[in-house]
Image (tube, rainbow, N blue to C red):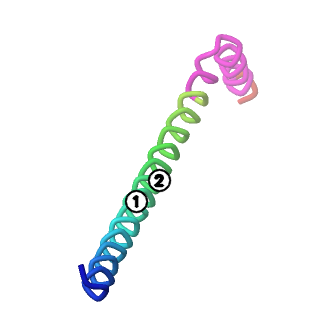
Amino acid sequence: MEVSTAITLLTVIVILLSVVIVTLLAIIIILLIKVSKLVNSIQRASENAAKISEWFSPVKVFTEAAKAFRSLKRR
């Protein structure tokens, strides 16, 4: 094998590996962005569920009902 052929083949291999590495990095970045959006969505949903469960606690319901009855008596 001649030296120029070996250099050409090594150059092609280096270029192909560079393209593969850049492609893999791009795929990883895209997946991380999608996972981040999914986590943010799940976090918002859990915060909303926490707020809803807070309103369904018996203490909160009775407190708000008592405030409503007091405000009706004042009128």
> Quick check: is 6 in the magenta stretch?
no
Query: Mainly helix, strand or loop, the magenta region?
Result: helix
Asked if residue 12 lies left or right of residue 43, the reply is left
> Image point 61% across, 23% down: which residue?
55
Which residue occupies the foreground of this view, 66 or 70? 66
The residue beneath circle 1 is 30
- Residue 70 location in percent, x, y? 74, 22
- Farthest top residue in view: 58
Asked if residue 36 lies left or right of residue 22, the reply is right
For badge 2, the amino acid type reads: Leu
Q: From the viewer's perspective, is residue 28 above or below residue 19?
A: above
Q: Residues within 10 Å of mark 2 (few under 14, many from 20)?
A: few
For badge 1, the amino acid type reads: Ile
- Residue 23 location in percent, x, y? 35, 66
> Image point 53% across, 41% down: which residue?
44
Q: Quadrant of residue 13?
A: bottom left
Q: Quadrant of residue 48?
A: top right
Asked if residue 7 lies left or right of residue 28, the reply is left
Which residue occupies the foreground of this view, 52 or 5? 5
Range drawn in magenta: 52-72
> Image point 76% across, 27% down: which residue?
74
**Element class at badge 2:** helix
Q: CA distance from mark 1 to mark 2?
A: 5 Å
Task: Please state the total of marks drawn on the protein image.
Answer: 2
Asked if residue 42 lies left or right of residue 74, the reply is left
The residue beneath circle 2 is 32
Contact, CB < 8 Å: mark 1 with mark 2? yes
Q: From the viewer's perspective, is residue 4 above or below residue 42?
A: below
- Residue 7 location in percent, x, y? 33, 83
Which residue occupies the foreground of this view, 53 or 58? 53
